[in-house]
Image (cartoon, coloured by chain):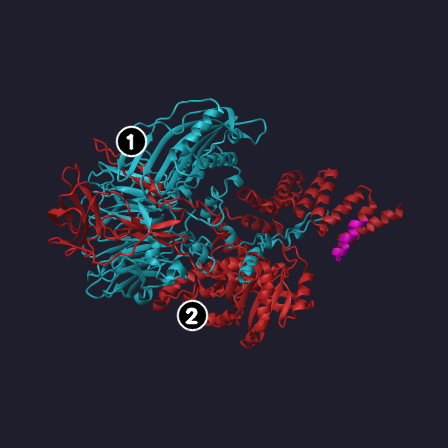
Chain colours: A cyan, B red
């Protein structure tokens, strides 16, 4: 009975109409024979204005440009839809392991030309830690000119992957499109993998494909495919194993809170702030009870309590939220576990969306609030360092917001100072540096943003910051990742900061989401890995002639750059070199935390990327 | 798009890039994409990532937090045949205790360059990794030299530390081996238990919005209103075809007495045939009669659905569709206390009666029913921040009511918005707008002046004030306000138009013309601006110049009867009788109740000898506006002409 009711509940969806904007029209009374002054009566209301009609969040409108390109009329996107369907069939054939020539004949021309799609590679590029990498970076030559050739070339993919159909997967993404009369040229990103008990094989390749339109207008057939770059890696086993269940299963909050994601909670809570919708489950690791074992604190949206879990001797976690007094229900974004008063225990910093809360640890993981500091609207990441070498930790908080009121909730733009420019936005709230001025027992933090020079270029949409002594002069410098434009690198000159990002080519003009410092080339100076968005749709659309027709080439270039993905900046002789494409690390998809981490302990930092923007049961992905 | 619940760059797999070392010149090789091999490539909406050697085996495991479930995932590093390690926990003494900022160099014999790492607090995205540093030593198994530059600058050299060991190092002291307290670890890979969702959606409100008064028809056909003041109302939406709704109504029937005694009236409104429901209202009536509901049953209507839909959109983060069964618990002060999608059960409703009497922070704690504590309770300043969310929710709902032309509801909502934030100029302005729309310009002026006292440089406020002053006949003041608006924003839409109208009314036609011209320049999509420019040219007896703007006006707005009428007049002046007739005809077609159009069409028919049609038009005009002298005059002319015949 109960189940039945639930089913019907979903079936009983009622779509309601939204009332449209009412336009006030009480025009002048038309005069019949002779026009005269009396006809202007009653015209007054026609000009009535509400502030809502004058101000809208331009930023959201600009996002929508990438929203649904087919609707927006990009011809290339309509073509992409056609090609996407055909590629889906090819990837299905490859996954199944039975590349069927007759099915292929509906996709490709009889005289389709192409190269091998899995090249013969005699020598491994790399082997270690149970992983072998083979790669070929030179484009292949045409090797056949018929369907049989293509069938064999495609069949070589599952053959190389091995395993059964169920253990294989294949994903094709079109990352650029060029239309030339009756030809469409598409660059396709190939990702195929086989994962089973015997190990993992994965292929990453770029194909240049050409599609010919036939007489009937909506028909495109593959006429050429050329392999541009190929990499196949084999691993004897997966590097990471998911042990979440064994660690968390004993806690009620595990299944009642953590195992229900934002899509579930956002139907039940009222935190309508924009960043909350995007998801801000900030986490901090630190030992809060001094037993030498690391614990974890998790931030949650408004209405859900933050959680503190304490590590037990056996490695599992115990929910300590209630005892700790830190299960705050206000909308929270990020946290730090650091010793703010140098008494040997880990205190807690939490950036709620408009306030920063510092809490004193009594040494056992029980906290009392020691200060609540004002922030702007839309606080995001926090990071700590002793910027002035006075022996205690100071706190820097990023902000991502559009103005003074709660514009995250999309009300109106007030005081946002001019139009929002997608690729160079500089009209957000400020980031703050709070200096730790605590004296024995009494805690005090003071906003020193302006006096230390950090208010320069400080109206960007900042998501994350990372402290590092990038110039090896002994003090902590600061890199700030900004969405919609350039990042900041503030050099610390004896406690005063200067933004030198442009001078050292450290701007990385894109959609900065995270900061990770590390010495990627082991030259003794720190390099940077910055998360951005890799957008297949953006890559396809931005170069089109009808994209953003009023914009300059420079603007278009900037917009295309936005879709490139993550950035690796190597520091060389006082400046940064963008090595992202050369080193093959741009494709982080819609990336958030993107970190240097030496996973196999070979002394070289690998890269880990957490990504994914909004997943719902619907799949409308571009 | 995302608010509507659509996926966007969703189901993306996390990535891992493997560092393949450097060539002989020290140049880093291209990384290898080992995302699938890594096993971390879950297609979840990943956010923060915290690196930590959780199991004390000398390699980096990590916690990842997700937007989607699981919100936390732990991934243990099982990399086969990984290199040796050195793990260091630093503790500052002269500098900060956590040694944040300490730079550590590990020199591995036989390797060209040192490995360099820094202790940090907060990097990546919304993440803080462990402060313990793990150095990968590759194949090296001997002793390594370590140099620490502590925050503050002190340099400490440690000549030899063993590989594959964990050390604790206090600033200025000798390093000590550190081992995790002995215990068997329980970590093991395994599938995750699913979450435990509730089968109804219950939204206990943090912001308590007054529910606008909504009129409905009882099943008997009598009109009634919700909510009723002084008692709780449980407003329920159902349909005869919705089985869970009917089952819920049976539950309400059973719990009717309990609810009544607790002060709750039930109003169950059926949706059959309302909005885009294709059902038949009579089915609902029959069903209600069959069930012999002891409480009020009636029919919903589109206005009610729209109001509920707007409440839902403004008070919940996702702009999802409403579903039935849907219930709203409205408190005795007429405020929405709890919204239920699905059937919550009578007991839950009774338990929720106290919800709206709680403090905001208590209501927030109850949002998810997971407990927790409130910062606002500790510090009222946090409440101020919460106010801002409340204000924007109230303000947006007020806008919705205004746009729906529900003026009294809009007035209430704008007033409530101002009660939370008295210095919100936009809300004061919009309250004025509501008064003006209702025709109460005196009240409107008070509200606009309030708005401008809060923010003088508010162009729309000055303009609105000007319009209301004009309506009150205070023309010089009105002109001043409009001009101030234009000074603040020369491109303010409709401001030039308003000034033009003001001058036109006074008979200052050439001045008016200048403003209309300006309006069409700065606001080229505004049909009325062109209409007015055409009309002023007509008034200046320059029918030729009127033609273009009027054509533009009807091109921009093909429903603008007035512009068609004026266009007809212009054609007529120019002797283009046929075109004039067509324009008047379109005018009447677009707006059959537009009297000037009817009269002009009548006159056209007189001119072209079609007296029967003329009579029909003029009679219709007189019917709509019995006082029209012109209609009467032309009608008698028609009759006279008919008599002559």
Q: Which residue is mark 1?
A: A124
Could you say whether the residue bearing mark 2 is in a helix, strand or loop?
Answer: loop
Q: For the magenta stretch, what is the residue range?
A: B615-627
B216 is higher (above) or lower (below) than A241: below
Please state the total of marks drawn on the protein image: 2
Q: Quadrant of residue A353?
A: bottom left
Q: Residues within 10 Å of mark 2 (few under 14, many from 20)?
A: few
| Residue B369 in the image, given as x and y percentages of width and height | 43, 65
Confirm whether residue A447 shows in the render. no
B406 is higher (above) or lower (below) than B523: below
From the viewer's perspective, tell me whether residue A294 is left or right of residue A105: left
Residues at circles 2 and 1 in contact by the CB criterion of under 8 Å? no
| Residue A261 in the image, given as x and y percentages of width and height | 42, 55
Same subunit under labels 2 and 1? Answer: no
| Residue A386 in the image, given as x and y percentages of width and height | 21, 53
Could you say whether the residue bearing mark 1 is in a helix, strand or loop?
Answer: loop
* CA distance separating discs 2 and 1: 67 Å
Residue drawn at 33 percent across, 36 percent down = A233
Quadrant in which the C terminus of chain B is drawn: top right
From the viewer's perspective, tell me whether residue B94 is left or right of residue A51: left
> In the rendering, which numbered label is found on residue B359?
2
What chain does badge 2 belong to? B
Q: Nearer the viewer, residue A461 or A578?
A: A578
Q: Quadrant of residue A225?
A: top left
What chain does badge 1 belong to? A
From the viewer's perspective, tell me whether residue B575 is left or right of residue B246: right
């Amino acid at each position: 009975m109960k189940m039945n009711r639930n089913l019907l509940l979903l079936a009983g969806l009622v779509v309601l109409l939204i009332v449209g904007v009412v336009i006030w029209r009480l025009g002048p009374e038309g005069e019949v024979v002779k026009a005269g002054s009396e006809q202007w009566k009653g015209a007054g209301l026609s000009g009535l204005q509400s502030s809502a009609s004058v101000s809208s969040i331009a930023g959201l409108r600009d996002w929508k440009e990438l929203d649904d390109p087919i609707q927006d009329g990009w011809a290339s996107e309509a073509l992409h839809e056609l090609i996407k369907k055909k590629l889906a069939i090819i990837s299905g054939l490859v996954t199944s392991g039975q590349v069927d020539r007759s099915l292929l004949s509906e996709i490709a021309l009889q005289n389709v030309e192409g190269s091998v799609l899995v090249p013969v590679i005699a020598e491994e590029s790399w082997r270690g830690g149970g992983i072998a990498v083979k790669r070929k970076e030179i484009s292949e030559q045409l090797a056949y000119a018929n369907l049989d050739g293509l069938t064999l070339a495609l069949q070589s993919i599952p053959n190389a992957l091995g395993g059964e159909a169920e253990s294989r997967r294949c994903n094709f993404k079109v990352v650029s499109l060029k239309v030339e009369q009756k030809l469409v040229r598409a660059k396709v990103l190939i990702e195929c993998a086989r994962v089973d008990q015997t190990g993992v094989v994965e292929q990453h390749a770029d194909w240049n494909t050409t599609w010919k339109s036939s007489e009937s207008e909506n028909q495109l057939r593959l006429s050429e495919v050329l392999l541009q770059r190929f990499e196949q890696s084999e691993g004897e086993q997966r590097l990471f194993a998911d042990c979440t269940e064994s660690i968390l299963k004993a806690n009620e909050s595990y299944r009642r809170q953590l195992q229900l994601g934002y899509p579930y909670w956002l139907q039940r809570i009222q935190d309508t702030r924009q960043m909350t919708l995007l998801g801000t489950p900030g986490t901090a690791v630190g030992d809060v009870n001094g037993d030498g074992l690391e614990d974890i604190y998790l931030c949650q949206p408004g209405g859900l309590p933050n959680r503190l879990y304490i590590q037990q001797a056996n490695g599992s976690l115990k929910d300590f939220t209630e005892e700790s007094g830190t299960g705050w229900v206000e909308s929270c974004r990020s946290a730090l576990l650091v010793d703010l008063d140098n008494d040997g225990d880990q205190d807690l910093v939490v950036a709620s969306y408009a306030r920063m809360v510092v809490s004193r640890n009594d040494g056992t993981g029980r906290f009392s609030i020691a200060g609540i500091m004002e922030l702007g609207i839309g606080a995001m990441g926090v990071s700590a360092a002793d910027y002035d070498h006075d022996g205690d930790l100071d706190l820097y908080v990023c902000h991502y917001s559009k103005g003074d009121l709660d514009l995250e909730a999309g009300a109106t733009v007030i005081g946002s100072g001019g139009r929002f420019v997608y690729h160079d936005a500089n009209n957000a709230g400020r980031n703050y540096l709070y200096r730790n001025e605590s004296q024995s027992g009494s805690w005090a933090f003071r906003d020193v943003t302006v006096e230390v020079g950090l208010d320069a270029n400080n109206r960007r949409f900042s998501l994350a910051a990372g402290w590092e002594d990038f110039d090896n002069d002994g003090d902590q410098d600061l890199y700030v990742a900004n969405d919609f434009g350039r990042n900041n690198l503030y050099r610390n000159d004896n406690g005063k900061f200067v933004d030198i990002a442009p001078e050292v080519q450290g701007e990385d003009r894109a959609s900065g989401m995270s900061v990770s410092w590390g010495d990627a080339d082991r030259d003794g100076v720190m390099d940077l890995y910055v998360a951005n968005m890799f957008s297949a749709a953006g890559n396809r659309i931005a170069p089109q002639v009808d994209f953003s027709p009023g914009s300059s080439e420079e603007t278009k270039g900037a917009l295309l750059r936005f879709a490139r993905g993550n950035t690796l900046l190597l520091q060389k002789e006082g400046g940064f070199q963008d090595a992202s494409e050369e080193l093959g690390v741009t494709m982080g998809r819609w990336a958030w935390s993107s970190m240097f981490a030496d996973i196999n302990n070979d002394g070289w930092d690998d890269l880990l990327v957490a990504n994914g923007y909004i997943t719902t049961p619907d799949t409308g992905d571009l | 798009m995302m608010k509507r619940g659509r996926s966007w760059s969703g189901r993306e797999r996390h990535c891992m890039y493997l560092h393949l070392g450097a060539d002989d010149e020290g140049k880093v090789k291209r990384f290898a994409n080992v995302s699938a091999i890594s096993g971390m490539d879950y297609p979840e909406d990943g956010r923060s990532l915290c690196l930590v050697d959780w199991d004390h085996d000398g390699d980096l495991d990590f916690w990842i937090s997700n937007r989607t479930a699981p919100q936390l995932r732990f991934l243990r590093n099982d990399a086969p045949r990984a290199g040796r390690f050195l793990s260091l926990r630093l503790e500052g003494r002269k500098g900060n205790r956590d040694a944040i900022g300490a730079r550590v160099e590990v020199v591995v014999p036989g390797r060209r360059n040192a490995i360099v790492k820094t202790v940090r607090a907060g990097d990546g995205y919304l993440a803080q990794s462990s402060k313990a540093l793990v150095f990968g030593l590759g194949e090296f198994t001997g002793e390594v030299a370590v140099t620490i530059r502590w925050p503050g600058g002190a340099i400490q050299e440690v000549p030899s530390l063993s590989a594959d060991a964990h050390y604790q190092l206090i600033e200025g002291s000798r390093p000590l081996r550190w081992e995790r307290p002995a215990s068997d670890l329980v970590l093991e890979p395994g599938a995750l238990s699913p979450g435990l969702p509730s089968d109804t959606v219950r939204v206990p409100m943090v912001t308590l919005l007054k529910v606008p008064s909504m009129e409905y028809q009882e099943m008997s056909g009598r009109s009634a209103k919700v909510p009723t003041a002084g008692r709780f109302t449980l407003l329920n939406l159902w349909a005869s075809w919705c089985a869970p709704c009917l089952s819920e109504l049976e539950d309400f029937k059973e719990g009717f007495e309990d609810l009544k005694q607790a002060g709750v009236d039930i109003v169950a409104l059926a949706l059959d045939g309302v909005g885009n429901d294709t059902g038949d209202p009579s089915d609902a009536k029959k069903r209600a009669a069959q069930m012999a509901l002891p409480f009020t049953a009636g029919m919903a209507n589109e206005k009610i659905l729209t109001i509920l839909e707007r409440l839902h959109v403004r008070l919940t983060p996702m702009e999802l569709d409403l579903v039935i069964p849907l219930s709203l618990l409205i408190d005795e002060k007429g405020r929405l206390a709890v919204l239920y999608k699905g059937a919550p059960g009578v007991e839950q409703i009774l338990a929720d009666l106290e919800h709206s009497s709680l403090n905001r922070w208590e209501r927030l704690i109850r949002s998810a029913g997971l407990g927790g504590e409130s910062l606002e309770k500790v510090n009222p300043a946090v409440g101020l921040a919460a106010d801002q969310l409340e204000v924007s929710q109230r303000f947006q709902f007020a806008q919705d009511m205004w746009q729906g032309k529900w003026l009294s509801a809009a007035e209430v909502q704008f007033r409530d918005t101002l009660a939370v934030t008295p210095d919100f100029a936009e809300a004061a302005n919009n309250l004025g707008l509501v008064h003006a729309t209702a025709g109460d310009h005196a009240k409107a002026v008070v509200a606009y002046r309030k708005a401008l006292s809060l923010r003088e440089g508010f162009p729309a406020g000055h303009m609105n004030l000007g319009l209301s002053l004009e309506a009150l006949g205070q023309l010089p003041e009105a002109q001043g306000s409009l001009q101030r608006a234009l000074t603040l924003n020369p491109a303010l839409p409709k401001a030039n138009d308003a000034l033009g109208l003001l001058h036109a009314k006074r008979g200052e036609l050439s001045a008016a013309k200048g403003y209309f011209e300006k309006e069409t320049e700065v606001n080229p999509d505004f049909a009325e601006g062109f209409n007015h420019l055409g009309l002023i040219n007509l008034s200046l007896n320059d029918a030729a110049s009127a033609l273009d703007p009027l054509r533009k006006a009807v091109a921009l707005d093909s429903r603008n009867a007035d512009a068609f009428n004026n266009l007809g007049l212009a054609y007529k002046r120019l002797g283009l009788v046929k075109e004039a007739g067509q324009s008047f005809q379109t005018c009447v077609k677009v707006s059959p109740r537009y009297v000037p159009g009817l009269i002009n069409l009548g006159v056209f028919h007189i001119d072209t000898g079609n007296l029967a049609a003329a009579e029909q038009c003029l009679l219709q005009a007189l019917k709509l506006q019995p006082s029209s002298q012109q209609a009467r005059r032309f009608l008698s002319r028609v009759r006279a002409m008919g008599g002559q015949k």
